[in-house]
Image (cartoon, rainbow, N blue to C red):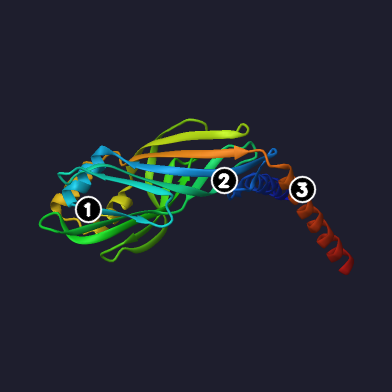
């Protein structure tokens, strides 16, 4: 029994160490290894198949703050020729070897469906604040939907078919990674359909979309300026003094 208990304790310690080795960093934060996460962005670009489905539903697309930028291109004849949204990365999670585990962005796009016979009874769908998990190849998002869907936080929306480009920080520089072949989950499909109030023709159009698009992640990593090191040093000294005072008080 004692041996089993020691084994369990050791296993728990290793598991805790694994969790501790992963760190979530905001822009300007330290990644370790003398590097900082300077800035980053994620660009979601809709696929041609998704654009065609949006055309069927005559869906209107607008920005949800706080995107960096969006491109919503419409042909003079009224159909979409391209839709993309670029959001800033507000959190980056890396392990002890500086492998990127996940990235979270802010902002998104709102899709509004009009009442259209056999296509939609009307509705809306907001997709924002993407959280990309590179380890499970999943994309989560905050959803705001009409027709009783309401607000869903960190909702499992898409699976990623392929990841190309670097997924490990190897030094200062810019790292560009492409996540392609976004396929919607069954629950995601149901949420899309209900939120937009899709009817027979609308559901049929959405069912033809086997690839929702591509996400391009751009991360810039730098070496801190000497002044940054000085501020970090002051911070460490302050923490040390506070700890000493608490120890004396006890």
Q: What residue sits right under mark 2 in the picture? A: 93
- Residue 193 left/right relative to 32: left
In the image, residue 166 above or below residue 62: above
Report which residue position mark 3 lands on: 230
On residue 59, the disc is: 1
The residue at the far front in this view is 76
**Which image quarter is the C terminus in?**
bottom right
Q: Residues within 10 Å of mark 3 (few under 14, many from 20)?
A: few
Residue 241 in the image, given as x and y percentages of width and height: 84, 59
Q: Residue at x 49, y 38 (%)?
A: 218
Q: Earlier in the sequence, mark 2 or mark 3?
A: 2
Kindly identify the residue that appears in the image at 25 percent across and 38 percent down.
Answer: 48
The earlier-in-sequence mark between 1 and 3 is 1
Residue 250 in view? no
Of pointers 1 and 2, the one earlier in the residue sequence: 1
Residue 173's label in the rendered image is none
Image side of residue 195 versus residue 182, left or right? left
Q: Is 232 placed above or below 180 here?
A: below
Q: Nearer the viewer, residue 228 or 247?
A: 228
Secondary structure type for disc 2: strand
Image quadrant in which you'd find residue 237: bottom right
């Amino acid at each position: 029994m004692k041996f089993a208990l020691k084994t369990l304790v050791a296993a728990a310690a290793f598991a805790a160490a694994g969790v501790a080795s992963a760190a979530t960093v905001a822009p300007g934060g330290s990644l370790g290894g003398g590097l900082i996460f300077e800035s980053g962005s994620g660009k979601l670009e809709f696929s041609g198949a998704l654009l065609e489905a949006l055309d069927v539903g005559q869906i209107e697309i607008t920005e949800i703050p706080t995107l960096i930028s969006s491109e919503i291109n419409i042909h003079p004849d009224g159909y979409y020729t391209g839709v993309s949204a670029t959001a800033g990365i507000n959190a980056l999670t890396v392990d002890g070897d500086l492998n990127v585990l996940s990235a979270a962005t802010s902002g998104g796009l709102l899709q509004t469906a009009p009442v259209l016979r056999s296509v939609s009874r009307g509705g809306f769908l907001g997709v924002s604040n993407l959280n990309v998990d590179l380890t499970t190849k999943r994309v989560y998002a905050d959803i705001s939907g009409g027709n009783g869907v309401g607000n869903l936080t960190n909702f499992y929306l898409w699976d990623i078919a392929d990841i190309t480009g670097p997924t490990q920080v190897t030094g200062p520089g810019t790292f560009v990674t492409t996540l392609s072949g976004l396929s919607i989950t069954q629950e995601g499909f149901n949420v899309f359909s209900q939120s937009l109030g899709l009817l027979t023709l609308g559901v049929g159009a959405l069912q033809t979309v086997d690839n929702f698009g591509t996400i391009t992640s751009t991360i810039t990593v730098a070496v801190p300026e000497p002044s940054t090191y000085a501020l970090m040093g002051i911070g460490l000294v302050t923490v040390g003094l506070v700890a000493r005072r608490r120890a004396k008080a006890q």
